Amino acid sequence: MLKGKVDDIIIQAQKDLLNANLLDSPDYIDLYSGGENTAVVQLLATLHYHYVALFEKMNARLPTGEHGAHFFADPSRDLIRVIDVTNLLLTGLKGTEYSFEIEAEFKSFVNICRQFLSGSGGSSIPPHIPKAPIYYTRQIFIPSTSVQIASSVSDKRNLKTKMIGSGSYANVYRFRDDFYGRDFVLKVAKKDLSESDKERFRNEYVVMKGLSSPYVAEVYKYFEGKDEFIMESLDETLYQYVSSQNDKATFNVEIRRRLCLQVMKAFEYIHEKQILHRDISPYNILIKKYEDSVVVKIADLGLVKIPESVLTNSQTEIKGCCNDPQLRHVGYSNYSLPHEIYAITVITKFILTGSMNICNVKDDSLREFVMRGTNPELDKRYSNVTEMRKYFQLLRFSGCSLH
C-alpha cells in the first residue's frame, strides 16, 4: 500500500513538472545520488536546478529597498509551480523511507516568496527583502534519516551574556558557546529605534554577511523578529589597543605601519564592493590578537552608503569622530569617497602617533601625507585608497619624530 502511495506521488510530481515544461535536468544529481529511488533523486535534483535558476533571476531585483521591485510573470509562474511540486513531495513522502526536510534558511526564504508571488502579471516584491539564498554545493532537500550536527548558537535559551558595550543603535554582549568552546558576540538593537534605524541595523548584518575579508568582522546568524545578530568576538577597539601600546618601545614604527596598511587594505576591499562606511573611528575598528600577529577588523557598518540604498538622507546625524568637518555643511546625503579618504587619513595618523589631531604633526613625511588626505579641496585628496596606500608605502618616517 505504501509503495503504491509513493509511486502515485512521484507520477503526479513528474506530470506537474512536465506540464510546466520544467521536467528533467542533469544538474545537481550528485547532491542526491545517495537515494535508492532514482525517480525521487531525479525529481529533487530537478527542483534544485529550477530553484537555483529562478532565484538567480530574482536576485537581479534584490535586495529591495523601501520601494520594492517587480519579478516578471514567467519566472513567477515557474517558481509557484516548483514550490507546489516541492510541497506535494514533502507532504506525500512524509513517513516513508524517502521523506525529507527543507534546509531551514532556504525554507524561510521560500515562505517569504509564497506571500508575494502572483500567478499572473508578475509579482510585486515587497520592500526590505534580502537576496535569495542559492545553494550550488549544498542540499536543499535533506533526507529525514540523515544525521544533523547541532547548530549550537542558534539556540539562545541558556546563554549567559555579559554586556561589553553600547552604541547609538545597539547594545553588545559577549557569551561563551560550549559547543565550540569559544566566545561570540550578540549585538541587540535598542528598543526605542525608529523603523528606519531598525532597517539600518538589519542592513548592517546583510552587508557584513556579504563581505569576506580577514579585515572585516564576521557575522553568523540574524534572529528574525528580534533585531539581533551573532558575530565573532574580538579583543578590543583600535583606540584601546593603540592607547595601551603607544608608549611602549615594542610598538615601533614598523608595527604601526603594518596596522595602517591593514586598515587601508580593508577599505580597498570595502570600496571595491561599492560600499562607503561613513562611520570610521578607532572605536569601531576592532582588534583580533593572535599569538604571532595582530589583525584589524572593520565593524559597525550600520551607516554604510551603497549605490541602491534609500536609507541615506541629509538629516542623518554625523556619527564618526574622524569625519570631515565639511560634512556638517554638505550633509550625509552628499557623503562621497573623498570624505572617506579624510577619515582613513585621520585613522592612519592616530595609529602612527596615538593622536587624531591633524594640526600638530612633527614628521615631515607624515605631515605631507596628512595634508594631502585632508586637503580642503576634495579633488586634491587621494583619488582612492589604493593610491593612498601606494603613496604611504613610499614614505620613510623618523620614529622619534612621530610622537
Image: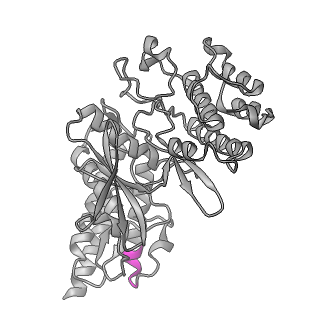
Q: Quadrant of residue 100?
A: bottom left
Q: Position of residue 274 (x, y in %)?
A: 54, 33
Whether residue 22 appears in magenta in the rendering, the answer is no
User: The C terminus appears in which quarter of the rendering?
Assistant: top right
The residue drawn where x is 24% and y is 67% is 88
Q: Nearer the viewer, residue 368 or 113?
A: 368
How many numbered tags mark residues here? 0
290 lies left or right of 139: right
The residue drawn where x is 36% and y is 28% is 311
Q: Nearer the viewer, residue 223 or 358?
A: 358
Q: In the rendered view, would you say 95 is above or below 45?
A: below
190 lies left or right of 18: left
Magenta residues span 36-41
147 lies left or right of 354: left
Q: Main secondary structure of the magenta part?
A: helix
User: The N terminus appears in which quarter of the rendering?
Assistant: bottom left
The residue drawn where x is 51% and y is 41% is 239
**Residue 73 shows in the view:** no
**Residue 241 shows in the view:** yes
Q: Position of residue 390 (x, y in %)?
A: 75, 34
Whether residue 37 appears in magenta in the rendering, the answer is yes
Q: Quadrant of residue 153?
A: bottom left
Q: Nearer the viewer, residue 78 or 389?
A: 389
Q: How is the image coloured?
A: one colour
Q: In the rendered view, would you say 307 is above or below 332?
A: below
